[in-house]
Amino acid sequence: MAETMQLSVSLPMAGSWATPANTLRVARRAEALGYGSVWTISRLLYALEPRNDYPAAPGEPWPEPFRSVADSIVALAFVASATDRNGSGQGSPGVAG
C-alpha cells in the first residue's frame, strides 16, 4: 500500500489577522479540507532595537507584526477544543534580533 503525505496549515499567529476568530476559522477550514494538522510559530522575545536585518529580507527591518505574537500553546489548545480530528504542532521558539 502506498504511503500518503499529510499536509499541514500554519495558524495565524502575528499581525492584525491573528485574532481568535480567524485562528478558529483557519483550523476548522483545514479540518474540513482534510489537512492533517495545524501548526503555530513561537516567538518568546523581540529585541526593542534589533541590531540585525530581517534574515528573509536582507537590508530590511524586522516586520512590525513580529512585536506581538500570540501564545502558541494557548492557540493550539483553543483550536483543539473546537475541532475533532486535526493534529497540531509548534515551531521552534525564536528570538528576534
Image (cartoon, grey):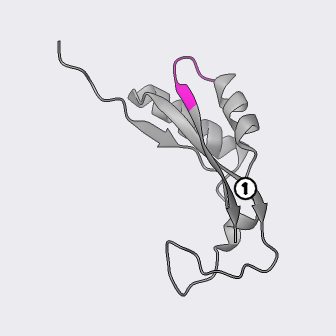
- In the image: residue 8, left or right of residue 90: left
The residue lying furthest to the right in this view is: 48
Pinpoint residue 91: horizontal percent, then vertical percent: 59, 44
In percent of the image, x 60 and y 22: which residue is there?
83
Q: Who is closer to the viewer here, 23 or 55?
A: 55
Relative image position of residue 82 (x, y in whole percent)? 66, 24
The image position of residue 45, as x and y in percent, is 78, 60
Figure quadrant of residue 94: bottom right
Which is the main secondary structure of the residues drawn in magenta? Answer: loop
Residue 45 to residue 86: above or below: below
Q: Which residues are magenta?
A: 82-88
**Residue 84 horizontal/vertical position (percent):** 57, 17
Instruction: Relative to 83, say whether 8 is above or below.
Output: below
- Classify mark 1: residues with Cα within 10 Å, few (<14), some (14-19) or many (20+): some
Mark 1 sits on what residue?
A: 69
| Residue 63 sits above or below residue 87 on the image | below
**Tag 1 secondary structure:** loop
Is 44 in the magenta? no
* Amino acid at pointer 1: Val
Q: How many marks overall? A: 1
